[in-house]
Image (cartoon, rainbow, N blue to C red):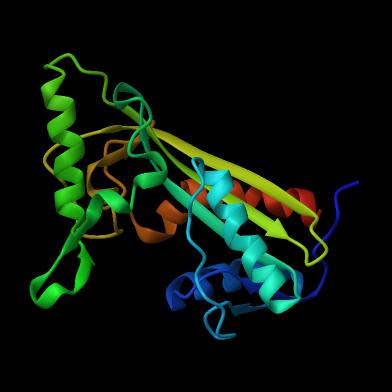
Amino acid sequence: MTRRIGAGSLVIATHNAGKLKEISALLEPFGVGCLSAGSLGLPEPAETGTSFAANAMIKARAAAEGSGLVALADDSGLSVGALDGRPGVYTADWAERQWFEGKPGRDWFMAMGKVEGMLQALGPDADRACAFHCVLAIAWPDGESAVYEGSVPGTLTWPPRGKSGFGYDPVFVPEGRQQTFAEIDAEEKHRISHRADAFARLVADQFE
């Protein structure tokens, strides 16, 4: 039988207030109260894994060991079949660039352009199939863990369309749809997203 989180406090392995809010809202109906690794002063571990699951587990275990509480982490990204699964675990890294005065930042248009440039280099018949993936990892302080994976298939379009969403959303058209993730209503996107798929698996295993 799968070990259960149960009601109580759960550390979300993030320093992002928006992500904490989103995950807290999803878990609130199950009596789970969430706090962030950032609010506990925990450092962000180096994500040295070669898969979404590995990186999610690195973050979850670091938060569990640092807090002494059950921890939840996620890792997500885009994989393109014709590019051998890239950008994959380097999805965010492809958007990294140096801004003026040496301040780091992310340029998602640059990242989308990099993917498009590589596809165009393969020729007009390049397969544009892709998928967004999300892995949720739960870690207990005693070392036990659980992993839940979700995904949503789609195709890449160009040029980017829509002003909602973030990251690669403006070029991602989910399977069976005509609009990009950046054109779809936010509530609808959250219902069909890779994160929603992963959370549905977590809920089914942990709370049902």
Query: In the image, what residue occupies the spot 62% across and 53% down?
Result: 57
Residue 28 visible in the snapshot:
no
Residue 114 visible in the snapshot:
yes
Q: Can you give x and y, in whole percent of width and height, for residue 64 in the image?
A: 70, 69
158 displayed left or right of 176: left
Q: Can you give x and y, in whole percent of width and height, for residue 131 in the image?
A: 40, 35
Query: Which residue sits furthest right?
Result: 1
Query: In the image, what residue occupies the spot 19% across and 45% down?
Result: 112
Q: How many marks?
A: 0
Q: Can you give x and y, in whole percent of width and height, for residue 184 in the image?
A: 31, 51
In-front residue for pair 95/19: 95
Query: In the image, what residue occupies the spot 12% across and 25% down?
Result: 120
171 displayed left or right of 70: left
108 displayed left or right of 23: left
In-front residue for pair 68/85: 68
Query: Which residue sits furthest left?
Result: 100
Query: Which residue sits furthest top?
Result: 125
Q: Can you give x and y, in whole percent of width and height, for residue 200 in the image?
A: 64, 49
Query: In the image, what residue occupies the spot 52% across and 74% down?
Result: 20
17 displayed left or right of 122: right
